[in-house]
Amino acid sequence: MDTSSTSGLRRTLVRDVMSTAVVSVGPEAGFDEVVRTLTRHAIRAVPVVSGSHLLGVVSEADLVRSAEQSPMSGRRTDPMATRPTTARAAMTYPPITVRPDTTVAEAARLMRRRHLGWLPVTEFEGGAERVVGVLGRADVLSVFLRDDAEIRAEVGAAVLPPLLGAEAKAVTVAVEDGVVTLRGRVPRRGQAHAVVSLTERLEGVVGVRDELTFDQDERITDAVARPWY
């Protein structure tokens, strides 16, 4: 798997885990055709494309809203409204997308923040967005399937030495089912906080148990050195 590295940390990119077998529909695809496409491929959303250029996205939620406009549903609130009959009419625009060189962690945060289970992966070509893949929850979760020993080794090699230097040997690391436990004593509170914060962001880390102690709390030192009056 190709990865991008910052300070020795593993950074899986969207391009590493996305699916390039993109199922799509054209803008004039009928309502029933879109439903059949979602059902046949067991997916919850589909990009609407012209050629390979992204126009929008039709999701199950879009189709449900469209169905509710049908006179047969009994829930039509606008007597002048008509149910969308094509993908173009039912799609959401502008779509929320992600780039191939985005980290999977960033994509996961976007999906959680926007309550999405799926994202089109796009690149710009001649001023238009071109669909190059799709990213689903299963793809995002794949980066968390890391061996505990691999996570422990990364903490020991890429987190502790850069932040603590020679003091790194005072910290022990244990990992069980993706939960990292950090024990030991470090010189300053800020260092302990940085170690925990960076460890929490590692791929595959489910949680961090912070059992670190420190010799000096910079907040107290600063308050004494610079009284408020």
Image (tube, rainbow, N blue to C red):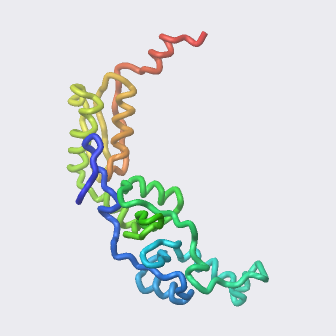
x and y percentages locating residue 71 in the rendered image:
72, 88
Q: Residue furthest front?
A: 126
Instruction: Quarter of the image for the N terminus: give it.
Output: bottom left
Report the residue at 61% width, 9% height from top: 229
x and y percentages locating residue 108 in the rendered image:
42, 57
Report the residue at 33% width, 42% height from top: 199
Q: Residue furthest right?
A: 79
In the image, residue 10 sits, relative to residue 32, either above or below, namely above
Is 82 positioned to the left or the right of 214 in the image?
right
x and y percentages locating residue 28 in the rendered image:
54, 85
x and y percentages locating residue 106 in the rendered image:
42, 53
Camera-nearest residue between 200 and 38: 38
Camera-nearest residue between 48 and 198: 48
Task: Please identify the quarter of the rendering in which residue 159 is found.
Answer: top left
Report the residue at 47% width, 16% height from top: 222
In the image, residue 137 sits, relative to residue 198, either above or below, namely below
Marker count (numbered): 0
In the image, residue 163 sits, relative to residue 29, either above or below, namely above
In the image, residue 149 sits, relative to residue 188, either above or below, namely below
Is 5 positioned to the left or the right of 194 in the image?
left
Camera-nearest residue between 141 and 49: 49
